[in-house]
Amino acid sequence: MRRMTARPANAHQARLLRLLRDGGAHSRAQLGEEVDLSRSKLAVEVDRLLETGLVVADGLAASRGGRRSHNIRLAPHLRFLGVDIGATSVDVAVTNAELEVLGHITQPMDVREGPVAVFEQVLDMAEKLKASGLAEGFDGAGIGVPGPVRFPEGIPVAPPIMPGWDGFPVREALSQELGCPVMVDNDVNLMAMGEQHAGVARTARDFLCVKIGTGIGCGIVVGSTVYRGTTGSAGDIGHIQVEPDGLPCACGNQGCLEAHFSGSALARDAEQVAREGRSAELAARLEAGGRLSAADVAAAASGGDTAALELIRRGGRHTGQVIAGLVSFFNPGLVVIGGGVTGLGHTLLAAIRTQVYRQSLPLATGNLPIVLGELGPAAGVIGGARLISDHLFSPA
Ligand SMILES: [Zn+2]
């Protein structure tokens, strides 16, 4: 199958491609209602897109009194690869051009093994998806990594939890290996794009997406577009100080949010609680498994363990403290909480909400939903597909 070789020639074509991606098949009349083009100009742009093979005419649209016309949709053979590299696992999925997930593989992985080993695994997973008949090749890939990325070069810069990745040309290397265009971004931005495309943020224009995993970061979406800042590090909220003389952080500072609450901080605190005999449940789990994780704390808390519940509440207060500052500064219409610790669920959410509503002004919080993400691990891979499709569906 011929892979995508053409890019839209102008902004009108790019807008049409994105409309078809986000809304599926449209009749010519429906497209006309969405774009500001005369009927004849629209016909010219649609015909040009049909010539490139990026879109196809498919089935007859419902009649609106006049001549019946074909529906227009994105070419059904287009395939995007979404890759979400976490600290301890990796998700790889293939989507169609409407970013529907056709196949999704999750595997354990250690990002500290460095880019060469991790990409070997990613390429192997991509091959598995191809072998299952879901794709003959990929038209583009969007990759998320758990650290700051210089965008659009796609190069991680001094990522605290990714030794060996500093300066590695992820975009270039993977583009060569996969034989298709690649875009690279912070994993948190991918999650925000995924929830925006198919999750809880579908109708939000200005929102924050806080990902609490091994670390903590925040995707900032302004006017439906991810805001990355001047160098790509916007939203790195894990290193905002929450305790003036607090715990040492991997970044070299003291009292960072991430040092006090994240997947790894929670595991550390839970082990301490277990050793000090403050929770029989956590002690039993530590005894059985040799170590604890955020999932152990979640399980203990759901059984009513007071020490586990207090760890989650304290984490929620620290996170809420930072989010309250962001809400005052940014006045978002929605705050989404996601990542590995969403298993902590409503206890965490309640603590975050209490802190934010207490600390921010009523005008900012009066109509501010703070909710859990809807898509789980699918958010990152859908976000990856969205990232590369945004790039490919831009004027060449
Ligand atoms: Zn820090």
Image (cartoon, grey):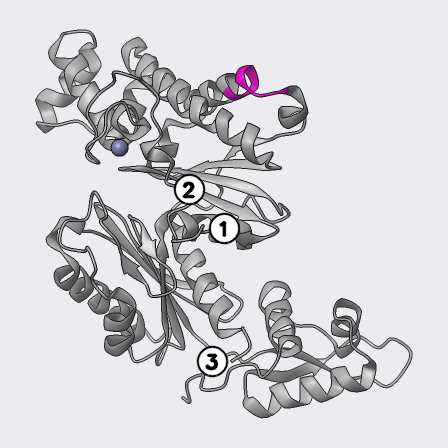
- The reply to whether callout 2 and callout 1 are in contact (CB within 8 Å) is yes
Q: Is residue 114 visible to the viewer in this orientation of the structure? A: yes
- Residue 196: image x %, image y %? 54, 50
Front one among 329 and 51 = 329
- The reply to whether callout 1 and callout 3 are in contact (CB within 8 Å) is no
Residue at 58%, 68% (x, y): give it.
21
Front one among 266 and 137 = 266
- Residue 109 magenta: no
Quarter location, residue 93: bottom left
**Which residue carries the number 1 mark?**
227
Mark closer to the chain start, 2 or 1: 1
Q: Three-letter amino acid code at disc 3?
A: His
Cα separation between marks 2 and 3: 36 Å
Front one among 379 and 334 = 334
- Residue 312: image x %, image y %? 34, 19
> So how many labels did they put on this image?
3
Q: Residues within 10 Å of mark 3 (few under 14, many from 20)?
A: some
207 lies above or below 20: above
**Which residue carries the number 3 mark?**
77
Which span of residues is magenta-colored? Answer: 356-361
